Amino acid sequence: MASSHNNSVDQTQSRTAGEAGWHVSRYNLSAPIPNTNKTAIANLLKGNCAVYTPIELYLLSVLDELDEHHPIIERFAKRGIICRFDELAVLDSLGRAACTMERSIELTICPTMGCNFDCPYCFEDHGRGKMSTEVQDDVVALAQRMLDASDSNCIHVSWFGGEPLLAPDIIESLSKRLMALAEERDGSYSASIITNGYLLTQENVDMLASYNVTSAQVTIDGMGSTHDATRRLVGGGSTFERIVGNLRTCKIPFRVTVRHNVHEGNKHEIDKLETYIETLAEESGNNLEYYPAPVSGNPVAENRGEQVRLLCGTDTSDVGIRQEASRFHIGRGHYCGAHNLWCVGIDYCGNLQKCWEAVDKPWVSFGNAHDWDPAHPFETASDPDNLTMYLNTACPVPDEECRECVWLPMCVGGCPHKRLFESRQCVAFKNNPEDYVLALVDRIGKNKDKDEVADKC
């Protein structure tokens, strides 16, 4: 009996990595490092990028034949480039869990859909109304129901529009009440704002800061006249100097992301604008961060004339690579808050939507702040299909081509709204993975030697 037991142990110890179930991840992207004999491998599920030597690459290529206790196994597994589980099943499970997973309730509130700008690529049809006191009451009551149903005590608000600073009184009123609601539960309240920056005066900055706004996004589309060509006032009029003046002279205690909507007419100014924002941050003492974002087409913009089609129809994959490399993260089964029951957009009439790009479209609403109860989300929805169609675009993604794609942990099938109402939007550089991996390596290299491992870079 003892001899039989020893033989069993010997067989277990002599298994190969392949026999033990180890295999190369399906979500690896690789690129040779120029002017070296090394290769970078990024794993999109683990959210890891590292540089490998020829010896390491050889060991990876003969993984099936290695002893399962070979020391390289642990190193490869930690970085995610090998595994012994079904990675697609993990993404599917993460997607299902995302539907009801909550750390806080997240409300995108539009105090008005009106705007003082007339940007040709904007996806919204702007209205003129502001949120009434009755709708504000409904918003607070909805927040309370959401806290009850989720058993959370944390609230995060994104102020959106239209231009939310056209209604600072509504921001102030609702902020007081929502902060009090969180405080009653010994919870927390935080907020952010998307604003064009034209009305970001010191008075408004101080008001926002007093109501726990911790970040803002302001768009600048280039230098001077380049910006003014697309970010103009209703009826015409420049806006660049006013926005820059606000960022320079106001003392802003929260982070400001300066978004650059990149299109054919301004992409040549990417480096110049980034340097300008860095200088502006140094001069003002404000925390300003540059963020390039490619302009994408949308039905509203396409109805506004040939100029917009030219702007929206260009290939900006180089910008997309830069953008995505800056926010490399662990893979997940959902794309955005549209896949989460506790993330809700509210327009000035109290209509509820699952996507920021739908807040001006009441026909996409799934309910109203007055009536919807997340404890019974489908029974109380006025149009449950408008709720379920967004939730059901999370993993498992209902698209076999997406399910077989190496980019799935990063794009998760793409923007739910565009998938539903326009077309599936793949990663712009889908067929150019090497440049993306090298962009990750470049990002790592700013802080680490390229030969070092950069876990969760």
Image (cartoon, rainbow, N blue to C red):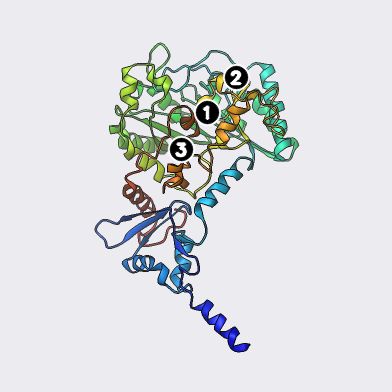
Q: Measure the alpha-carbon separation of dots 3 and 1.
A: 15 Å
Give the label on residue 264, or none.
Answer: none
Q: Measure the alpha-carbon separation of dots 1 and 2.
A: 13 Å
Give the label on residue 348, or none.
Answer: 2
* Extreme-left residue of the structure: 35
Of the numbered discs 3 and 1, the one sitting upstream in the chain is 1
Of the two numbered discs 1 and 2 in the rendering, the one whose residue sits closer to the viewer: 1
Residue 119, position as x, y percentages in the image? 40, 20
Of the two numbered discs 3 and 1 in the rendering, the one whose residue sits closer to the viewer: 3
Residue 248, position as x, y percentages in the image? 43, 30
Residue receiving disc 1: 356
Q: Which of the 4 image quadrants contains residue 342?
A: top right
Residue receiving disc 3: 414
- Callout 1–callout 2 Cβ contact below 8 Å: no
- Callout 3–callout 2 Cβ contact below 8 Å: no
Q: How crowded is mark 3: few (under 14 residues within 10 Å), some or many (20 or more)?
A: many
Q: How crowded is mark 1: few (under 14 residues within 10 Å), some or many (20 or more)?
A: many
Q: Residue at x 56, y 20 (%)?
A: 363
Question: Which amino acid, mark 3?
Answer: Gly
Q: Quadrant of the N terminus?
A: bottom right
Question: Which amino acid, mark 2?
Answer: Tyr
Residue 303, position as x, y percentages in the image? 39, 17
Depth check, front residue: 423 or 46: 423
